[in-house]
């Protein structure tokens, strides 16, 4: 393997790793040689993914409810029990809520902001020491936040709390990049439409419109996320921090034209 993209000997944690974007990220990290821990509220999803991907390398499933501060603290403690080093944290666990403006409930703000914005901060805060234990300015540890193109543009769907939380996560990425350098880099990926459970109903209804909106003419594939995550986790990106990388086939820039 090209040493610029080799993660042999590295350990990564992927939240929300049992399905969707998290599963894509976990598969890419395994392919690059990393040991991968995956966590989500639904342990069965993580165990199923671990069984399916186990032939690629060492992968472990954990249960964690990251919607509370206590859940983030608990997951960090369990990770520290399982490994004495952590090189990559992928903050992917998230939720979405859609409803018309006049009907959008307060609970939709609490649920989505707690998981999509506050949890990445809490978990990074709790794991910063473990991430920095073996890191150096020449070989920094990595935090990769999973944002969304809905945090870069006005969304086409009424997901008010989701788009606001993702925009907040993008700016939190920049803030933490300054705070945690030089031993940690902090970057974000802003995915466009992918064939995940979160997007399933929307794509079933009108996938063609998303394909038409993308200059590259298609929705995302598993390898698109896997490649982006590996790049941000690997030596190739050691001099990159505070960046929000759209992985969306050009949808976000086309919206500005």
Image (cartoon, rainbow, N blue to C red):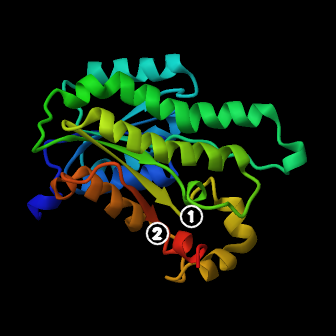
Q: Is residue 58 above or below residue 125?
A: below
Residue 149 in picture, x, y percent from top left: 55, 60
Location of residue 51 by image quarter: top left
- Apparent side of residue 233 relative to residue 66 in the rendered image (left or right): left
Which residue was labeled with disc 2? 221
* Camera-nearest residue between 21 and 238: 238
Q: How many marks?
A: 2
Q: Is residue 252 above or below residue 61?
A: below
Q: Residue furthest right?
A: 102
Residue 96 in picture, x, y percent from top left: 66, 46
Secondary structure of the residue carrying tag 1 is loop
**Residue at 48% across, 74% down:** 249
Instruction: Tell me, yes or no, if residue 37 can be seen here.
Output: no
Disc 2 and disc 1 in contact, CB within 8 angstroms: yes
Instruction: Tell me, yes or no, if residue 22 can be seen here.
Output: yes
**Residue at 67% across, 60% down:** 154
**Residue at 76% across, 31% down:** 107
Give the quarter of the figure containing the N terminus: bottom left
Separation of disc 2 and disc 1 at Cα?
7 Å
- Apparent side of residue 180 relative to residue 155 in the rendered image (left or right): left
Location of residue 157 by image quarter: bottom right
**Dot 2: within a 10 Å radius of its alpha carbon, few (fewer than 14), some, or many (20 or more) residues?**
some
Which residue was labeled with disc 1? 195
């Amino acid at each position: 393997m090209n040493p610029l993209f080799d993660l042999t000997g590295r350990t990564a944690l992927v939240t929300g790793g049992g399905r969707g974007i998290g599963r894509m990220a976990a598969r890419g990290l395994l392919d690059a040689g990393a040991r991968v821990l995956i966590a989500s509220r639904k342990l069965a999803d993580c165990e199923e993914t671990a069984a399916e991907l186990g032939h690629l390398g060492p992968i472990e499933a954990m249960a964690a409810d990251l919607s509370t501060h206590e859940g983030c603290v608990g997951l960090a403690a369990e990770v520290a029990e399982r490994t004495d080093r952590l090189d990559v944290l992928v903050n992917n666990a998230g939720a979405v809520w859609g409803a018309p403006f006049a009907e959008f409930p307060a609970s939709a703000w609490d649920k989505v902001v707690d998981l999509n914005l506050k949890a990445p901060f809490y978990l990074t805060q709790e794991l910063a020491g473990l991430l920095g234990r073996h890191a150096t300015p020449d070989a920094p540890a990595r935090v990769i936040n999973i944002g969304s193109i809905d945090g870069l543009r006005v969304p086409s769907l009424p997901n008010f709390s989701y788009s606001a939380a993702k925009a907040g996560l993008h700016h939190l990425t920049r803030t933490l990049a300054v705070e945690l350098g030089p031993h940690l880099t902090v970057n974000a990926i802003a995915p466009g439409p992918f064939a995940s459970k979160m997007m399933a109903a929307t794509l079933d209804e009108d996938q063609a419109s998303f394909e038409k909106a993308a200059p590259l003419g298609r929705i995302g594939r598993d390898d698109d996320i896997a490649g982006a995550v590996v790049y941000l986790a690997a030596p190739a990106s050691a001099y990159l921090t505070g960046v929000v990388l759209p992985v969306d086939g050009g949808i976000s820039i086309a919206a500005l034209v």
